[in-house]
Image (cartoon, coloured by chain):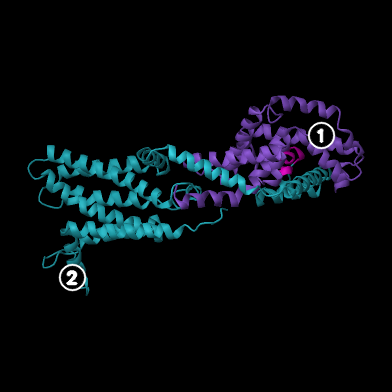
Chain colours: A cyan, B purple
Amino acid sequence: MSMGCHEVRDQLPFYAAGTIPAEQRSAIADHLASCPDCRAEVALWSAVGDQVTAEDRRLPAPSKAVLLGALDRVRRERQRVSAPMRLWQLLRAQVPLVRRSLWPASAVIMAASCLLSLGLPQGGPILLAVVAPLVAAAGVAMIYGPENDPALELALATPTSPRQVLLARLALVYGYDLALALAGSLALSAFGGPAYALRGLVLSWLGPMTLLSALALTLSLWIGATNGATVSFLFWLARWLLPAPGAAHALALPVPGLATLAAALELLAGSAPIQFGLAALLLSLGLWRVGQATVPGRTWA
Amino acid sequence: MAGGDEEALRTLYATHGRRLLAYAFRLTGNRALAEEVLQDSLLAAWRGARSFRGDGRAISWLLGIVHRQALNATRRKRLPGIGLEEAEAAGTVLAAPPADVASAVDRRDALGAAIGALSVEHRAVLELVFYQQLTLAETAQVCGCPLGTVKSRLNHAKARLRQALEQAGRGAEDLL
C-alpha cells in the first residue's frame, strides 16, 4: 500500500541523509515517484545536507594540543585517586556489565544442589561437588567478549586495560561462586550430619571449580562463551561418567584410549596441586590472549 | 597511567576527534571554544566510559557528551549558545532574514547563509542528521529531548530555509 504525504514528511530528512532502513526506503521511494511536493522537499533536504557536510569538511582537523591537554588532565586526575580506591571502582564498575541473570541463576542452582544433597543417600559423590564447578565455569565463560558485552568496544578504549577488565570480572564472578559454594558447604556441614565434614566438603569442589573455571574462561576467549562452556561441561561430565580404572562401571565401553583418559582424569581429580597449577597456566594463557586480541588503533564501526 | 591507557585515548581522538570537533563548533560557533569543549568531552568520556552500557552507537554517546559540555561552556562564558533564549530569538530571524540572504546570487550561498541564520538548536539538529548521519532516535538522545522536538525543529528549520530561499529568488524547486 502506498504511503501518504503525512506519513512520509517526517522521514524525508533522514531519507535524504541516507539513514533510513532499506525496507522503509523503498516505501518512501514509491511515494516520491508519484508526489512532486515530497520530491521537492527531498531536494531541499539534500541541498541542506550537502551544504552542512561541505561546511563541516572545510573545518580543519582539531589541533594536537587538544589531545595532549586531555592526556595531561587524565594523568593528573589518575594521580589523585589511590590504588585501593581504583581497584574498588574497577570492581564496582564491572557489576552492571556482567549479565544480570548470572547472579540469581548461580545462587538458585547452588542452593538446589545443597538441598538435594541432603535428600540423597550418602556414600556417593556429593552433589554440590559436581554442580559448583559447573556453575562457576558457566558464569566465568560469560564474562568477556563481544558475545557477552556490547560495551566492550568502548571499554577497550578506556584507561582500564583489557587484562584488568578481565581480571576484575573474573574476581567478581569466581568470588561470588566461591562464596556461594562456601555458604552451601557450611549449611551442609551444619544440617547434613557427620558425612559432611566442612574441610572435606570444601576440598571436594575447590580444586575442580578453579580448574574448570580457568578452562571455560580461556576457551571462551578463543571459541566464544557458548562453545567454551560446552567443552568444559563435557570435560567435567567425562570425569564423572568414565569408569574409574579397574572399576566395573555401567558405561565401560570397549573404546581404545578410554581407560588412559579415565586414568588421567582420575589423577587430575585427585590432586589439588595439579588442579591449581593447571588453572594458573590456563589463566596466563587467557591473559596473553586478551592482550593479543586488542590491537591499538583499531577502529569502531 | 599505563602506556596502553594513553593509546586508548589517542585512538578515540583519532577515530572521532574530527566529527566531535565539528559538532562542538556547530554549537559554539567559536573555534577556540570548540577545541576547549572537545578536550572537556574527551576527559568526560574517559571518566564516564565505564558507565556506557552499549545501548546504542559509541558515536551518539560521545556526541551527547559534546552537547552537554558545549551547553556548560556557553553558559559558563555567558555566550549565546544552546538555550531557550536562542529558540525565542529564532522567531525574530524568521520575520527579518539577514540582508545577505536576500541578496545572495548563488543558491548555495543563500542556503548557507540561511542555515547560518538558524538558531543553534536548529543548526545542531541539521548537523546531527546530515553530517553525523544519526537516526531520529539518536538525534533526540544527543540533544536530550523527545523525538517530537527533533521533528518540530526539522520542520521549523525547513520552513525558514524555504522562506529564505524564496526571498533570495530561489525556490525549493530550483534545487531539483
Foreground label between 2 and 1: 1
Please indicate, yes or no, whether residue B104 appears anywhere in the rendered image: yes
Cα gap from disc 2 to disc 1, whole angstroms: 84 Å
* Helix, strand or loop for the magenta stretch, by majority: helix
The reply to whether callout 2 and callout 1 are in contact (CB within 8 Å) is no
Q: Which quadrant of the view contains residue A192? A: top left
Amino acid type, label 1:
Arg
Q: Is residue B17 magenta?
A: no
Q: Which residues are magenta?
A: A4-13
For mark 2, name the chain.
Answer: A
Q: Which quadrant of the view contains residue B84? A: top right
Say which element carries label 1. Answer: helix
Amino acid type, label 2:
Ala
Q: Residue B11: image x %, image y %? A: 55, 52
| Residue that mark 1 sits on | B160
How dense is the environment of label 1, judged by Cα within 10 Å: few (below 14), some, or many (20 and up)?
Answer: many
How dense is the environment of label 2, judged by Cα within 10 Å: few (below 14), some, or many (20 and up)?
Answer: some
| Residue that mark 2 sits on | A259
